[in-house]
Amino acid sequence: MILVSHSIIGTSLGILQSSPYASFFVALISHYLTDMIPHYEYSIAGLKENADARETRKTFLRIMTDGILAVIVPVLIFYFGGYVNGWYDLIILLAAILGSVIPDAVQGVTLVFSRNRVLRAHQMMHDAIHHAISSDNMGIKRYPVLGISSQVILCLVFLAFGLYFG
């Protein structure tokens, strides 16, 4: 799942919490749970050791754009939408954003520090969760519109939930 989708879903749940710690934790758990659902994801092959410079630049730009949108979109929705009233609510919002994207950020760190056992263990767990329901069996790789649609629907459902109860 792309970062902005994780962020919208995680902040929709995290903004409902009364503490930044709960917000972070709920958003973190939402990341792993939504990764179980068949979805679209872009390739990060450009970050592999044998990737050429052009592919690396394209991948880096894609990830940076997604990461920036993962912060901007929830802030626009919840902060400027009037769901954040004061500094404490802003901290709750930012904790949810962080919790929702950190598992994928750790994946990037794992590519750099591939010998670290803790990072490798997280990567194996994340991969197992990610492929609990195989996207290949659902036709997501052949028909990306299915995977993109599942993310849009999930985002809208969780966003409606967060805005209604927030």
Image (cartoon, rainbow, N blue to C red):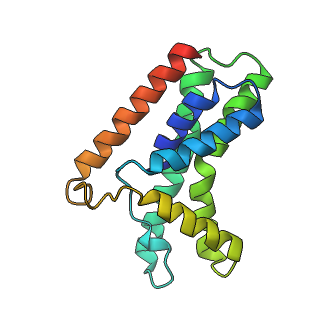
Q: Residue at x 70, y 77 (%)?
A: 116
Question: Is residue 71 positioned above or below 104 on the image?
Answer: above
Q: Which quadrant would the C terminus be assigned to in this image?
A: top right
Judge by depth and name the residue closer to the eye, 46 or 149.
Answer: 149
Position of 79 relative to 44 (above/below): above
In this view, 155 is above or below 126: above
Front position in the image: 108 or 59: 108
Residue 141 x %, y %: 26, 60
Q: Tell me: 14 left or right of 150.
A: right
Question: Residue visible at 49% across and 64% down?
Answer: 127
Q: Nearer the viewer, residue 53 or 96?
A: 96
Give the residue drawn at x 26%, y 55%: 140
Q: Position of residue 13 (x, y in %)?
A: 58, 30
Residue under the image location 24 percent in, 46 percent down: 146
Q: Residue furthest front?
A: 132
The percent position of residue 18, horizontal first and vertical second, equals 74, 23
- Residue lying at the far bottom in this picture: please name it: 50
- List x then y, in percent, for residue 131: 41, 60
